[in-house]
Amino acid sequence: MGKEEEHLPLFETKRAKGIVLYRLFAASVFAGICLILVYRLSHVPKAGADGRFGWIGLLGAEIWFAFYWLLSQASRWNPVYRHTFKDRLSQRYENELPGVDIFVCTADPTIEPPMMVINTVLSVMAYDYPPEKLSVYLSDDGGSEITYCALLEAVEFAKHWIPYCKKYNVEPRSPAAYFVSVPADDAVEDNQAKDFVVIKKLYKDMENKIENAVKLGHISEEVRSKHKGFSQWDTYKSRRDHDTILQIAIDGRDPNAADVEGCGLPTLVYLAREKRPQYHHNFKAGAMNALIRVSANVSNGNVILNVDCDMYSNNSMAIRDALCFLMDEGKGHEVAYVQFPQNFDNLTKNELYSSFRIISEVEMHGSDGYEGPIYIGSGCFHRRDTLCGRKFMKGSKSDMKWEISRKREESGIHELEENSKSLASCTFEQNTEWGKEMGLKYGCPVEDVITGLSIQCRGWKSVYCNPTRKAFLGLAPTTLPHTLVQHKRLSEGSLQILLSKYSPAWYGHGKISLVHQLGYCIVCCWASNCWATLFYSIVPSLYLLKGISLFPQISSPWLIPFAYVIIGKYTWSFVEFLWSGGTILGWWNDQRMWLYKRTSSYLFAFVDTILYFLGYTDSAFAITAKVADEDVSQRYEKEIMEFGASSPMLTILATLALFNLYCFAEFVKEATTGSKGMAQVYETMALQILLCGVLILINIPLYQALYLRKDKGKMPASIAFKSMAFVLVACTCFKFSY
Ligand SMILES: *[C@@H]1O[C@H](CO)[C@@H](O)[C@H](O)[C@H]1NC(C)=O
Ligand SMILES: CC(=O)N[C@H]1CO[C@H](CO)[C@@H](O)[C@@H]1O
């Protein structure tokens, strides 16, 4: 190895091309926005005149949109892209790679089926990494015997699966995803074919055993008697009341722990931390903190990766990608965590319920140009010591290199299990800094974001790693209600952050850059978007009904800024969407979800947050089901929107959709039969007609679900009835109110 080679960095950072052009464009849109506001302010109807209320409301909405648009520029101003050199990493550090502890968190065996959890566990056990340095921890907050049993089955299967993966270098290494990706048995090469048949049969056997246990709902005596670990459930009362259950299912440092080819296996640990009704368990943050302590005792890897139980590893080299950042000689010591995007395995082609595409492909790269991406709670590699509260010091080199912990060598496995258990007890954290300065923070439904923020506020940077081949794939919700509930939870949690003591506005003040603070605010202000959007989708249509114009006439020069901003903004959003890999119809679907999220999820999130701060409700952490019925999946694959059960959120969406349809129909009737000429109507009302028309077009799937569809996923009849009644009452009142 030459002297120069030793100093080549392990990763490179590229700035986006054409950024100056984008900035010029953004500045011109901003000028347009300013002109719109000038128009609104200078043309307010006189007191008592028709449309004064609507006008002032629109002014408010436009000020909000302008503000939010400015925020969103923070994440587009300076995007950067990273590339790693994994070969340099192996050349320099192959024998000194640090220990990596992987946390997989599951919380509910019915919503998150054991087979899914096991596939994720197997995929991370099969990483291309020295097995003696790899440890996988499954945190089972559901405390389920069945999940435990599934893990024991997985141990046996892993002894065949891991050598198979390494021998044939298969990808992805989640067995379920792998078997789906290999089309027919004959597609595999000759000498692999035999092994393939064997491994697939072993998998099916394991699957049958686990599925049987799931159907039965408990573990049969026969299986129980085979493994003494099940005795830990003897004192189990319920999932909210049990002792710590911990087992080191594979001890990677034990020479007897080997796969069928005689190679070492990674350590594998099952943990269900103690739960008692009188102690708050702090959801996933509580589980993560228990894992941090237990893993420190068992394997004490320098790097911690955490993944949700539905996010399997799609790239066995991902650990090495992350280490390229953490071990880089030049900049590595500044990096606290490496965040990978959240990608989904089961999106349909046109992403009916939208995905986090723009966030992953655009906005996260934008924040990477400043202090770095937010921590999104899954697919993230942390340094252990920063997660435990260490501050960044200038000039200090952090040493990641491998060392075997002495303590570990001396104690036997049983002793180790016993003394680890106390670390996961309910009382351990009392009067300690856990949940405050150490580990993940408590008291917020999106604890990940504030944890990441506080790490950045201690002086660290983070890095966004988004290779074309995605490192982690999870499951996206497959029905509209689930999607809306998911977004309600996310936006509610983020709004709580904004109003809490950890708000990026004041907690971050002076510690992170202003642009980065704004970047955090994009997320934190999600929920607050509801009001302006609701106003814009109701009031202009309502005034259309009355024939009152709220926008400039076609012939007025003031139309130009409106047209420029509308066309400019939407053209850009379209280009951005296609550029980041989406489809045309996908963009249209994304616009629909934009509207639906804002008028339902965000509205409920906003109201609930206010109630929470007034002390009326308790914020809860809702997990959404990951697996759908056969019929629901079929419709999902055909991209037919699933409405299903009645809910207040759907009622709002249906009411808004019907309301716009009604206004438009009334308007057309008036315009064709009324006294005013058509030409004059278009002259004064063009933008309102356009807005109302677009709202109707985007709602087409909803009208179909209300009136045309017969399947189970249609809009329930009760909603059709309720929304129609609301619209008629509201419009009649308005029409006769003057
Ligand atoms: C997942 O990995 C496979 C290779 O095993 C690759 O072909 C595929 O594109 C990856 N998926 C995504 C979404 O990147
Ligand atoms: C759990 C779930 O709904 N999985 C679905 C994901 O999407 C694929 C196809 O896109 C379906 O086959 C799965 O059933």
Image: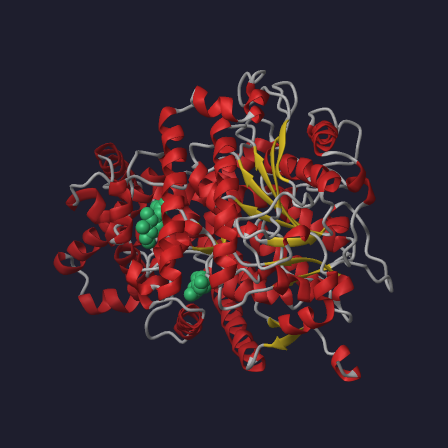
Query: Relative to 672, does residue 561 appear above or below in the rendering?
Result: below
Q: What x and y, as percent, mark residue 81?
A: 59, 72
Relative to residue 615, is residue 172 drawn left or right? left
The part of the image, by quadrant, that contains residue 196 is bottom left
Give the left or right position of residue 271, taking residue 647 as reference.
right
The residue positioned 61% from the left and 19% from the top of the image is 277
Render colour scheme: secondary structure
Q: Position of residue 652 (x, y in %)?
A: 35, 40
Front residue (pair 500, 182): 182
The reply to whether residue 170 is in sight is yes
The quadrant where residue 340 appears: bottom right
* Nearer to us in this view, 451 or 548: 451
Residue pictured at 45% horizontal, 37% vertical = 114
Outermost residue on the right side: it is: 395
Q: Which residue lies furthest to the left in this view?
A: 673
Compared to residue 738, the image places residue 427 above or below, namely: above
Question: For the N terminus, which image quadrant?
Answer: bottom right
Number of marks: 0
- Ligand 1 is found in which quarter of the picture? bottom left
